[in-house]
Image (spheres, rainbow, N blue to C red):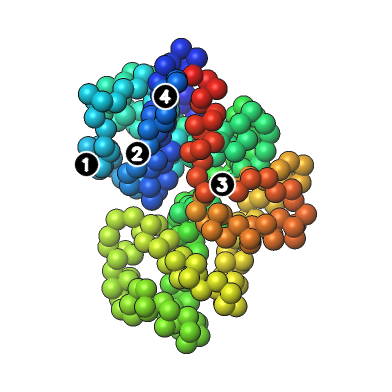
């Protein structure tokens, strides 16, 4: 892991960045001032080139150097788990903001610091993608490799969305769900395939099919898909850690929050201690970094 040292206690202001593959939340945090929030599309160095990330910053981030000032950047993001990608992102951010002090961490570290603070816990992300780790209160002490949206990401938005698309294309849905699907996405399967394989961000595209399940909660097929997919995450990830039975489980991400009743049910089923389920890590990250300003 590559870490750029930031001595937060002497930093009067810091730009916090929490980025997933779909969206990025930005927060300018200055001691004694109200946090200022910004939003852009998602950033993932595995899915975007340096040029594409720079273009996103220039075109979407409403950052005015005359009005906004930060002494340091603390970036947490999807696809930023390796030293190479951390260095790549740090270089981009230093160049864009003209700030020398930049710290880049994974989205897993964002979730851990936001939900656990300085305490131990099992931390999971269920958003567009998914991941899990054991956090010892200071660092991520154990984490299995992520296979990403093609071969992994169990329980995530793109994983669930893939199942929804399969059920429609293979004519598994009953008439009610078939019609509900077509009202949202149309009935041209070939066009969907073209989008999936011919346009950028196929993980985001697949995650968009989750909306059907949100709109049809209570239907037995909807409930089966949600429970089966999230249970796959428990089976392949959470249950592989011994600490899952010793420590509270914390979740963040749009899928975890939207289907929190299913997460709660599975925790009871496996006799696991459920901690917090948060839609986004940003609020917790603000609290974490405020203590260090």
Whichever of callouts 2 and 4 sits on the residue coming sooner in the sequence is 4
Considering only order in the chain, which callout, 1 or 3, is on the residue closer to the N terminus?
1
For the residues bearing labels 1 and 2, Cβ distance under 8 angstroms? no
Q: Is residue 99 above or below residue 245?
A: above
Indicate which disc, 4 or 1, sits on the residue closer to the N terminus: 4
Structural distance between the alpha carbons of marks 1 and 2 = 13 Å
Real-space Cα separation, disc 2 to disc 4, in angstroms: 16 Å
Q: Earlier in the sequence, mark 1 or mark 2?
A: 2
Q: Nearer the viewer, mark 2 or mark 4?
A: 4
- Residue 69 at x, y percent in the picture: 31, 22
State the SS at label 3. strand
* Residue that numbered label 1 is attached to: 59
For image coordinates 44% across by 43% down, the residue present is 78
Across and down, in percent, residue 175 comes to: 47, 87
Marks 3,4: beta carbons within 8 A: no
> Circle 4 sits in a helix, a strand or a loop, which is it?
loop
User: Hey, which quadrant is residue 49 in on the image?
Assistant: top left
From mark 3 to mark 4, how far is it between C-alphas? 25 Å
Q: Residue at x 57, y 33 (%)?
A: 113
Mark 3 or mark 4, whichever is nearer to me: 4
Give the distance between the C-alpha atoms of the residues marked 3 and 2, in whole angstroms: 19 Å
**Which of marks 4 and 3 precedes in the sequence?**
4
> Whole-Å distance between the Cαs marked 3 and 1?
29 Å
The residue under label 4 is: 33
Position of residue 258 measured from the top left corner of the image (x, y, whole percent): 54, 58
Residue, disc 2: 38
Is residue 150 or residue 213 the one in the foreground? 213
Looking at the image, which residue is at 45% across and 20% down? 31
Q: Nearer the viewer, residue 231 or 116?
A: 116
């Amino acid at each position: 892991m590559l870490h750029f040292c930031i001595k937060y206690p002497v930093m009067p202001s810091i730009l916090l960045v929490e980025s997933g593959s779909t969206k990025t939340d930005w927060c300018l945090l200055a001691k004694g001032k109200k946090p200022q929030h910004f939003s852009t599309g998602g950033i993932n160095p595995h899915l975007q080139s340096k040029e594409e990330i720079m273009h996103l910053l220039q075109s979407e981030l409403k950052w005015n150097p005359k009005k906004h000032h930060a002494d340091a950047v603390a970036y947490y993001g999807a696809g930023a788990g390796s030293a190479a990608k951390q260095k790549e992102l740090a270089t981009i951010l230093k160049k864009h903001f003209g700030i020398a002090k930049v710290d880049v961490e994974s989205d897993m570290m964002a979730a851990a610091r936001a939900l656990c603070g300085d305490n131990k816990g099992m931390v999971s992300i269920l958003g567009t993608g998914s991941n899990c780790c054991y956090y010892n209160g200071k660092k991520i002490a154990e984490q299995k490799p992520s296979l990403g949206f093609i071969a992994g990401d169990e329980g995530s938005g793109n994983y669930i969305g893939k199942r929804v698309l399969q059920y429609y294309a293979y004519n598994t849905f009953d008439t009610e769900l078939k019609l509900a699907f077509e009202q949202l996405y149309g009935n041209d399967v070939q066009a969907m395939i073209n989008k999936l394989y011919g346009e950028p961000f196929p993980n985001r595209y697949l995650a968009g099919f989750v909306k059907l399940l949100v709109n049809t909660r209570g239907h037995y097929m909807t409930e089966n898909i949600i429970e089966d997919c999230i249970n796959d995450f428990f089976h392949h990830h959470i249950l592989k850690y011994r600490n899952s039975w010793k420590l509270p489980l914390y979740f963040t991400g749009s899928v975890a929050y939207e289907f929190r009743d299913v997460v709660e049910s599975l925790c009871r089923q496996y006799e696991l201690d459920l901690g917090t389920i948060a839609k986004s890590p940003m609020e917790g990250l603000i609290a974490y970094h405020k203590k260090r300003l």
